[in-house]
Image: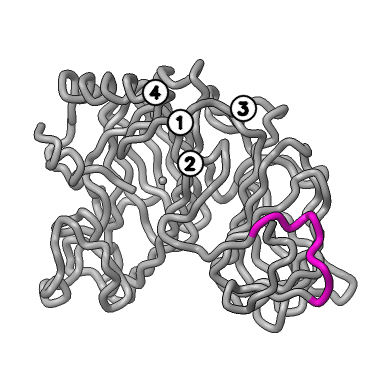
């Protein structure tokens, strides 16, 4: 495979005394040490070790055309095969007829895909497949190498097909980079949800994808994940706060990193610092953080964990410790295709009428 084609097929890498509304925050008092840094959100979102980056996708897809793609007139003027510019509220990404990411390789890290709205179809080089929807999470360890397809079929012909997902890349330590690939489904019925009521009866809702908040623990991760060891204090949470709600994010290990992504709403006050929407806030992990929401509902993603603390070498879909290992990954992929592609199409979408399911490489199937 030519390198240019290879690149095309890959998917989705002291503020304390500064006061500036242009940077998206203001202070009523001196900013506390618990607020370490505030920066605008970009695409993808920047992260801290042990995470690599986070891609947030919200696409307001129209009605489907009967074969789970947009109607032909909606494709006019798009750079089909590499459509990342929002037009009419959505993108095709690398998809040609159905939006999404046709098969592409990964090695050396994990993907955590949180679905808030819409449909995601998974297929991979191990013969595994699945469909997951709003509230579900897929956790995939790429390990020594896997190809997979992530498509967003427009299954509804009588209403819009809005999609909202996060895809978080969690690094693997050197000792785990060449483990066997594996994926796990965290179904919405099983994921712990906290509904916190404050003194004014305002609600904060927290979805625990990974980690622990007070006495509530998330489901387990994949077995070889950095998150599998509770000493690494990996936390992944989505949070919705009602207008005027108050909530305290408990402290975690002081050596952990902690990032809050404020992606929808207006303003929120964190330990006395007012932050505007569309900003990332890096926080001290060893202290509780007071959230005091503004006059509209606010939405956050929170990532935290003890850093792996190893060198990171990245090239597209490969994340290793050295660039020599990156070259080895590229050579291995071109030689083996990480097991090849057992599906008839590059863009695999499951039958429109099929519900939520996961077919694993060992033949085990979950149906929801």
Q: CA distance from mark 1 to mark 3?
A: 20 Å
Q: CA distance from mark 1 to mark 2?
A: 9 Å
Is 231 situated left or right of 323 in this image?
right
Q: Residue at x 34, y 25 (%)?
A: 323
Q: Quadrant of residue 271?
A: bottom right
User: Which contiguous range is marked in magenta?
Assistant: 28-37
Quadrant into which the N terminus falls: top left
Residue 46 seen by the camera: yes
| Mark 1: secondary structure | loop
- Dot 2 corresponds to which residue? 52
Q: Earlier in the sequence, mark 1 or mark 4?
A: 1
Is 39 situated left or right of 330 in this image?
right
Residue 191 seen by the camera: no
**Please, what is the dominant secondary structure of the magenta stretch?**
loop
Q: Say above or below: 282 vs 19.
A: above
- Dot 1 corresponds to which residue? 312
Which residue is situated farthest in the bottom direction here?
A: 295
Q: Nearer the viewer, mark 1 or mark 3?
A: 1
Q: CA distance from mark 3 to mark 2?
A: 17 Å
Q: CA distance from mark 1 to mark 4?
A: 7 Å
Where is residue 7 shown, x and y percent of the image?
20, 42
- Dot 4 corresponds to which residue? 322
């Amino acid at each position: 495979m030519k390198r240019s084609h290879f690149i095309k097929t890959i998917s989705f890498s002291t503020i304390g005394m500064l006061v500036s509304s242009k940077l998206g925050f203001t202070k009523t008092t001196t900013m506390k040490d618990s607020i370490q840094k505030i920066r605008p959100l970009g695409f993808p979102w920047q992260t801290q070790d042990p995470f690599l980056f986070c891609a947030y996708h919200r696409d307001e897809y129209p009605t489907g055309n009967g074969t789970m793609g947009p109607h032909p007139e909606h494709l006019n003027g798009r750079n089909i095969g590499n459509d990342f510019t929002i037009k009419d509220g959505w993108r095709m990404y690398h998809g040609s007829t159905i939006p999404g990411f046709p098969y592409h390789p990964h090695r050396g890290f994990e993907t955590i895909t949180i679905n808030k709205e819409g449909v995601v179809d998974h297929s991979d080089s191990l013969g595994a497949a699945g469909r997951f929807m709003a509230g579900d999470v897929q956790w995939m360890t790429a390990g020594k190498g896997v190809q997979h397809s992530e498509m967003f079929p427009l299954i509804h012909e009588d209403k819009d097909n809005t999609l909202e997902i996060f895809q978080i890349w969690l690094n693997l330590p050197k000792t785990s980079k060449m483990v066997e690939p594996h994926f796990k489904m965290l179904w919405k019925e099983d994921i712990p949800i906290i509904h916190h009521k404050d003194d004014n009866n305002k609600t904060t809702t927290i979805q625990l994808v990974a980690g622990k908040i007070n006495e509530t623990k998330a489901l387990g991760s994949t077995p070889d994940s950095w998150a599998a060891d509770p000493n690494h204090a990996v936390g992944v949470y989505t949070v919705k706060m009602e207008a005027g709600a108050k909530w305290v994010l408990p402290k975690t290990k002081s050596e952990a990193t902690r990032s809050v992504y404020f992606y929808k709403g207006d303003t929120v006050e964190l330990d006395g610092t007012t932050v505007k929407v569309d900003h990332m806030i890096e926080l001290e992990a060893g202290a509780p953080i007071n959230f005091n929401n503004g006059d509209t509902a606010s939405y956050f993603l929170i990532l935290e964990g003890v850093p792996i603390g190893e060198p990171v070498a990245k090239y597209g879909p490969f994340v290793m410790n050295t660039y020599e290992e990156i070259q080895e990954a590229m050579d291995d992929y071109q030689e083996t295709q990480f097991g090849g592609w057992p599906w008839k199409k590059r863009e695999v979408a499951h039958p429109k009428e099929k519900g939520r399911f996961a077919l694993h490489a060992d033949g085990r199937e979950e149906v929801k």
